[in-house]
Amino acid sequence: MTCYHGSPIAGIKVLSPPPGRPLYLTDCRAYALFYIRDLEINWVTCGVRDGVVVYDEQFPGQLRVLYAGQSGWLYACEGEFAPGNSPWIVLAHEPVPVTSAEFIPDAYEAILREIDAGTVRVDKYENKSEEYLQERTEGMARHIVKSGWLEADTPKARFAEQYFPAAWEMAKAPP
């Protein structure tokens, strides 16, 4: 079976699992594009439903913000892999040789082509109900507190403060 691994890192010849964890791969090329991202932010909000990648925007313009200008690689490999926690995810517990690598100069542009082809659908922030947005804000505020981002000066904390301002303010309020 051909599986893919998206990465902003060039020149990988062998995909190796991180120490103590499996290597995640997917049999869905379009889904792998979403892993060509800023590894310090590491904000992926999509899954696959009925063979189509469904991307969930959690703030206005999220798809463009996270993927425009991001270059990287789609690595393909062949083999038999262990099932993952989702039907489109497989796991490798040993290093896997790369059989081909495709350079993606702009992940956003590549994802837009997949949208045009019908392999990706975006659930836009602007189309969400007020009830959903309020629940999402409350959940994000809890996540900000739990993750310790209020006290952190990290790219991910700055990302949360910039793109989830209502949740950030809610997280700063006394319990």
Image: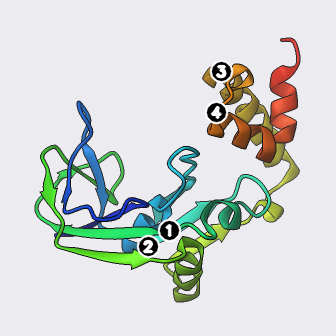
What residue sits 56% from the left and 65% below the top?
54
Residue 60 is left or right of residue 29, and the answer is: right
- Crowd tier of the residue under label 3, counting other residues whose Cα lies within 10 Å: few below 14, some 14–19, many 20 or above: few
**Which circle's residue, 3 or 4, is located before the other in the chain?**
3
> Mark 1 and mark 2 in contact (Cβ < 8 Å)?
yes
What residue sits 60% from the left and 65% below the top?
67
**Which circle's residue, 1 or 3, is located before the other in the chain?**
1
| Mark 3 → mark 4, Cα distance in angstroms | 10 Å
**Which circle's residue, 2 or 1, is located before the other in the chain?**
2
Q: Name the quarter where the C terminus is drawn.
A: top right
**Which circle's residue, 1 or 4, is located before the other in the chain?**
1
Q: What element carries label 2?
A: helix
Q: What element carries label 1?
A: strand
Q: Mark 3 points at which residue?
A: 148
Q: What element carries label 4?
A: loop
Q: Name the residue under label 1.
A: 53
Q: State which mark lies toward you, 2 or 3.
A: 3
Q: Name the residue under label 4.
A: 154
Q: Which residue lies furthest to the bottom in this view?
A: 117
Q: What element carries label 3?
A: loop
Which quarter of the figure has residue 126? bottom right
Q: Nearer the viewer, residue 133 or 72?
A: 72
Q: State which mark lies toward you, 4 or 2.
A: 4
**Which circle's residue, 2 or 3, is located before the other in the chain?**
2
Q: Which residue lies furthest to the front in this view?
A: 11
